[in-house]
Image (cartoon, grey):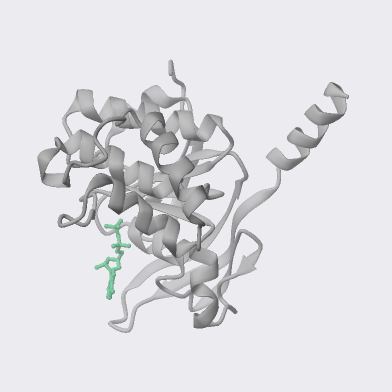
Amino acid sequence: MEESFNTVQSVQASEPIIEFSGVSKMYKTGTHALEDVNIKINKGEFVFIVGSSGAGKSTFMKLIMREEKANVGDVIVNGYNLTKMNRKDVPMLRRTMGIVFQDFRLLYDKTVYENIVLALRVIDASKEEIKAAVPAVLAQVGLSGKEDHYPNELSGGEQQRVGLARAIVTKPLLVIADEPTGNLDDETANGIMKLLFEINAKGTTVIMVTHDRRIIERSGRRAIFLEEGRIVTDTKMGGDV
Ligand code: ADP
């Protein structure tokens, strides 16, 4: 019994959750932000997207979220072909992903509890589901007892924990994090990385943009390096995490 369960898991682990085939993105201004990108990211992977400013990292993430559309090629995410997807189907796609921002993007006139509940309302969670899910996710990110606080009563690291809680409370297949540690000091950043690795260990695919070489090098995870819109390196980093 246990063996067959393991087999099923390993089959799922090599199933792509994101696939770019011959993807190019040119903005209306004529800038070629991505050029012939071909990449597969499997379910359960933790992947860093790395590159200097203007390399195409945000465009890559925006294509995954269908905030932008490729001009050429196919972007497949969670089984949806985003190049062909109608705008009206975008909310359905977004429900399968949790998004974490560098600047947290919390609602500052709402409590921690309310910020997280809003994410659950989007997926039409019932009152009972909300009542169970919010304390559980707050415990997971180490914020039990802070539910009635407003974001500006919290430290930056705590605010990002709320951001993480909001992203994962809906149990997304994919977490997308754009420089989630960019506004945090090293120690606080390490706490956020630990949480992201834990979320990944539970099976959620994580894609994270970062500039922080130390985080990447210590991680032992796959890192995709972009330069001028092209993938120049796709490698697993040696690590001690
Ligand atoms: P990164 O996130 O690595 O800094 P971006 O994906 O934001 O890179 O940008 C890649 C290139 O595309 C840059 O030259 C940038 O100026 C350009 N770009 C990004 N967004 C737009 C846009 N909305 N309109 C026009 N050009 C853009």
- Residue 116 drawn at (x, y percent): 35, 50
Image point (24%, 49%), residue name? 104
Q: Is residue 170 visible?
A: no
Q: Which residue is at the far left?
A: 153
Vertically, is 154 above or below 114?
above
Residue 118, by quadrant, is: bottom left
Query: Which is more toward the observer, 70 or 37?
Result: 70
Residue 197, by quadrant, is: top left
Q: Is residue 217 visible?
A: yes
Image point (54%, 66%), residue name? 93
Image point (59%, 39%), residue name? 44
Vertically, is 92 above or below 126?
below
- Residue 124 drawn at (x, y percent): 50, 63
Image quadrant for the N terminus? top right
Vertically, is 42 above or below 27?
above
Image quadrant for the C terminus? top left
Q: Which residue is at the far front?
A: 128
Residue 58, by quadrant, is: bottom left
- Ligand 1 is found in the corner quadrant, namely bottom left
Query: Which is more toward the observer, 176 or 167?
Result: 167
What is the total number of numbered labels drawn onto the structure image? 0
Q: Which residue is at the far top?
A: 240
Query: Is 51 on the left-hand or right-hand side of 146?
Result: right
Query: Which is more toward the observer, 171 or 114?
Result: 114
- Residue 239 drawn at (x, y percent): 44, 20
- Residue 231 drawn at (x, y percent): 46, 52
